[in-house]
Image (cartoon, rainbow, N blue to C red):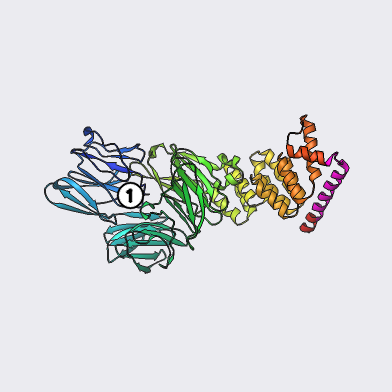
């Protein structure tokens, strides 16, 4: 049996069924047995009963089907025919043997061999070969059960790797190749194929996921393990109710400093772990069940993207309070870029790329301007993103064909400049490209980097006059704390902005921020807690009510007005001027 490519994402909720004399075969979910007229086809449904694939009519009845234990593919048997199919239904290979009808199929635990019992009394054995994984210029192909060939397409160099047992699983990144055999885990550096690290295995491994610094492995004995590339076990993340057989590339998100797992007992919860210490760091709870998770791969702030049961895509930080932001609807598959912070998805017949997803936490109104779309209606509803690195996104279509889409290289170059604080080259790049997408990305990156001058230029280039004026207003703030607080407020993080001002000793500035937002009760609470500027709050409140022509409606402020009586405007103005003078003196000293 032959398989064209290897490494497709596992989708445990899918299953395949066929009928033979009223007999149904299923995987992990119940389904309606097809009618007798459909004996000449095999069909695939998802866990909600929605049809995903229906094969073309076969010459003879389908007599058996069986899922591989890893859930990535299944075998279908008929008269003189054994077919290997992907989880989405299309065929990898078709073998014809003069053996009669195949009435039963069974896979080995490592999903590399299948046995078929025929009506003639013969037993057929199949071995998966010609599996292939790719990353960048490297292609790794399994030529024989116990050997691999590594090809570098840049210089046509080739390396042949031989193992003592058959290869059961493999994973490649830009720096390492991890190969699993029936008894060993062999770890190669992509710069040296002669001296690998070898560790012995006790269980059957079903999943390998790599990051820049280490990799995760799931087996039947130890469950989930995090290992470094020397083969040493770093940690074993665990939680009550965790099941290793439910872990897959969809239910497990992996990065250098975080591991995200969908809780099988409560699919609405995503648990986050530190891969080094195995300590649970947070739990993100969604309103409905989560089907897939993915973690960003670049250094810096870690973001988690998740797809829920309604096929909606959300973005949330992994540190601090979880704030889910809805990015898109009708999303089929997602993948973070291996080299930068962009996110790619196949959604509603389009290939969508968010060049700077962090914009939702800087200036979410710029999100449409930092997003690009390409028509991808030809890839089908069950397409999946196989690879997204640099400027290339590789998609496997619903019929198994692999399609490559190109994305713009400029946003990644811009992100590289901004991450290093090189704002002048970033401005020159945007002036050269002359695209609103680039200016919008630069504006968000400048806000993230607290670079007000660059943000001012970027907002001017895309005609965002209101935000341009606000950037000018922030630049005029006398103190560092005031400028940072205004930026936090611009990013809709008011609580942090107020706390920053209070911690810096600028209570009046914090009170005034709440007053500007018409949060009178919060302003009064801050003034009362710090025993200062209580009369200032009442003074601004009375001026506001006089302007709109309405009476006081807040009970606490009515009681305060009765206690203080008439407000001495001169005294209040004097205190305000004293605060402004103190800010100017502190700001002038700080700049000197």
Q: Residue at x 46, y 58 (%)?
A: 211
Rendered position, 101 above or below 183: above
Q: What range of the chain is rendered magenta?
A: 564-585
Residue 268: give x, y in percent of width and height.
Answer: 46, 45
Would residue 473 be seen by someone viewing this image from the given angle? no
Query: Is 584 part of what is drawn in magenta?
Result: yes
Indicate the position of residue 185 as horizontal and vertical percent values.
Answer: 35, 64
Question: Where residue 103 appears, x then y in whole percent?
Answer: 17, 46
Toward the right, the furthest residue is 570
Q: Main secondary structure of the magenta part?
A: helix
Q: Position of residue 504 (x, y in %)?
A: 73, 55
Q: Is residue 75 left or right of residue 196?
A: left
Q: How many marks?
A: 1
From the viewer's perspective, tell me whether residue 456 is left or right of residue 299.
Answer: right
The residue tagged with tag 1: helix, strand or loop? loop
Q: Nearer the viewer, residue 404 or 343?
A: 343
Give 172 or 272, whichever is nearer the viewer: 272
Q: Residue at x 66, y 44 (%)?
A: 490
Could you tell me if residue 93 is visible in this image? yes
Q: 137 and 19: which one is in front?
A: 19
Quadrant (top left/top right/bottom left/bottom right) for the C terminus: bottom right
Residue at far left of view:
120
Q: Which residue is mark 1?
A: 72
Graded by Cα atoms within 10 Å as few (under 14), some (14 to 19) or many (20 or more), the crowding at tag 1 reads many
Q: Nearer the viewer, residue 550 or 41?
A: 550
Q: Residue at x 41, y 36 (%)?
A: 377
């Amino acid at each position: 049996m032959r398989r064209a490519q290897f490494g497709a994402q596992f989708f445990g909720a899918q299953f395949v069924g066929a009928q033979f004399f009223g007999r149904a075969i299923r995987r992990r979910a119940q389904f309606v047995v097809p009618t007798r007229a459909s004996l000449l086809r095999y069909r695939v449904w998802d866990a909600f009963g929605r049809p995903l694939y229906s094969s073309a009519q076969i010459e003879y009845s389908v007599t058996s089907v069986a899922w591989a234990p890893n859930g990535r593919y299944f075998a279908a048997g008929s008269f003189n025919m054994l077919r290997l199919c992907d989880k989405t239904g299309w065929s990898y290979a078709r073998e014809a043997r003069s053996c009669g009808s195949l009435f039963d199929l069974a896979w080995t635990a490592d999903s590399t061999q299948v046995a078929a019992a025929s009506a003639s009394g013969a037993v057929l054995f199949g071995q998966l070969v010609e599996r292939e994984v790719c990353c960048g210029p490297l292609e790794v192909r399994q030529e024989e059960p116990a050997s691999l060939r590594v090809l570098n397409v840049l210089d046509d160099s080739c390396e042949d790797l031989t193992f003592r047992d058959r290869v059961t699983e493999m994973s490649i990144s830009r720096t390492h190749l991890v190969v699993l055999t029936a008894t060993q885990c062999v770890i190669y550096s992509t710069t040296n194929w002669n001296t690998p690290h070898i560790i012995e295995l006790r269980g059957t491994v079903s999943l390998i996921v790599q990051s820049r610094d280490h990799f995760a492995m799931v087996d039947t004995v130890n469950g989930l393990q995090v290992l470094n590339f020397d083969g040493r076990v770093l940690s074993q993340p665990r939680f009550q109710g965790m099941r290793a057989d439910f872990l897959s590339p969809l239910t497990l998100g992996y990065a250098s400093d975080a591991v995200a797992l969908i809780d099988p007992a409560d699919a609405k919860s995503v648990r986050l772990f530190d891969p080094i210490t195995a300590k649970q760091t947070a739990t993100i709870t969604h309103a409905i069940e989560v089907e897939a998770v993915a973690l960003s791969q670049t250094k810096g702030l870690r973001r988690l993207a998740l797809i829920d049961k309604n096929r909606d895509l959300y973005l949330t930080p992994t540190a601090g309070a979880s704030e889910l932001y809805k990015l898109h609807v009708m999303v089929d598959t997602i993948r973070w870029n291996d080299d930068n912070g962009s996110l790619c998805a196949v959604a509603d017949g389009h290939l969508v790329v968010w060049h700077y997803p962090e914009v939702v936490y800087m200036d979410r109104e710029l999100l449409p301007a930092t997003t690009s779309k390409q028509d991808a209606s030809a890839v089908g509803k069950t397409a999946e993103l196989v690879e997204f690195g640099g400027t290339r996104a590789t998609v496997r279509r619903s019929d198994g064909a692999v399609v490559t889409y190109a994305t713009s290289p400029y946003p990644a170059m811009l992100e590289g400049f901004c991450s290093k604080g090189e704002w002048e080259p970033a401005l020159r790049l945007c002036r050269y490209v002359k695209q609103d997408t680039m200016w919008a990305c630069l504006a968000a990156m400048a806000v993230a980097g607290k670079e007000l001058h660059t943000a001012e230029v970027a907002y001017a280039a895309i005609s965002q006059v209101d935000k341009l004026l606000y950037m000018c207003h922030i630049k005029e703030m006398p103190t560092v704390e005031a400028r940072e607080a205004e930026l936090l407020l611009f990013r809709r993080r008011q609580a942090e902005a107020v706390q920053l001002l209070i911690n810096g000793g600028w209570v009046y500035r914090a009170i005034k921020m709440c007053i500007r937002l018409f949060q009178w009760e919060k302003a009064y609470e801050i003034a009362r807690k710090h025993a200062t500027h209580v009369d200032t709050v009442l003074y601004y409140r009375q001026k506001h009510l006089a302007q709109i022509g309405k009476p006081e409606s807040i009970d606490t402020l009515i009681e305060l007005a009765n206690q203080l009586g008439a407000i001495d405007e001169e005294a209040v103005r004097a205190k305000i001027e004293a605060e402004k003078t103190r800010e100017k003196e502190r700001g002038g000293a700080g700049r000197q």
